[in-house]
Image (tube, rainbow, N blue to C red):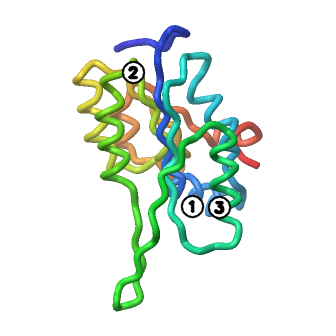
């Protein structure tokens, strides 16, 4: 297992929907993305930070997207899709995974800010390829499979004063 050190190049990929819904359902609070990015980088050399967001035509979302840019995140925006039966869907799992595989080749570590177990296979693959993989999520809602697949899991619930607004 590789260890974290200051000379590492790191990419941070944030699953904004996963983090938002968990923070709201458990704490009725929002994520402090500046602190999240700082915690993910952990003194290393940041090469890219990408936040994957969904546009749902909410009045405050453009302000949120701009704030992410100001913090240092590139934003990848996907419009929510409404189907004929009225159901809605939007997720970034495939896009986030493709970016992780592509960017891992140019980094020593990838930090996934999510608790979504769908990324466990991705984490195992990246580790097999020699990349350090970390995840940051809430213990209460993070997949055991994901936590077992990474080199390090940071439980955001352990420091809500830091990671939540």
Which structural element holds mark 1? helix
The residue under label 1 is 21
* Mark positioned earlier in the residue sequence (1 or 2): 1
* Of labels 3 and 2, the one closer to you: 2
Q: Secondary structure at mark 2?
A: loop
Circle 3 — which element? helix
User: Residue 78 occupies which quadrant of the picture?
Assistant: bottom left
Q: Position of residue 7 (x, y in %)?
A: 51, 8
Q: What percent of the width, then of the height, locates residue 15?
A: 48, 49
Give coordinates of residue 57: x percent, y percent: 59, 74
Q: Say which residue label 3 marks.
A: 24
Q: What residue is drawn where x is 42% and y is 78%?
A: 88
Q: Residue at x 25, y 41 (%)?
A: 121
Along the line of sight, the residue nearer the viewer: 149 or 54: 54
**Residue density around tag 3, few if under 14, some if 14–19, many if 20 or more, within 10 Å:** few
19 relative position to 108: left or right: right
Measure the alpha-carbon separation of dots 1 and 3: 5 Å
Q: Earlier in the sequence, mark 3 or mark 2?
A: 3
Q: Which residue is mark 2?
A: 107
Indicate which disc residue 141 carries.
none
């Amino acid at each position: 297992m590789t260890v974290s050190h200051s000379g590492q190049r790191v990419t941070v990929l944030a699953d904004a929907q996963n983090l938002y819904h968990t923070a709201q359902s458990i704490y009725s609070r929002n994520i402090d993305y500046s602190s999240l990015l700082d915690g993910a980088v952990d003194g290393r050399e940041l090469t890219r930070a990408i936040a994957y967001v969904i546009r749902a035509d909410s009045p405050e979302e453009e302000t949120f997207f701009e704030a992410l840019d100001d913090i240092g995140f590139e934003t990848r925006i996907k419009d929510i899709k409404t189907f004929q039966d009225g159901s809605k869907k939007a997720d970034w799992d495939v896009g986030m995974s493709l970016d992780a595989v592509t960017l891992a080749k140019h980094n020593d570590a990838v930090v996934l800010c999510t608790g979504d177990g769908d990324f466990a296979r991705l984490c195992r693959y990246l580790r097999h390829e020699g990349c350090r993989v970390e995840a940051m999520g809430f213990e209460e809602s993070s997949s055991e499979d994901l936590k077992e697949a990474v080199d390090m899991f940071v439980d955001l619930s352990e420091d809500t004063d830091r990671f939540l607004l």
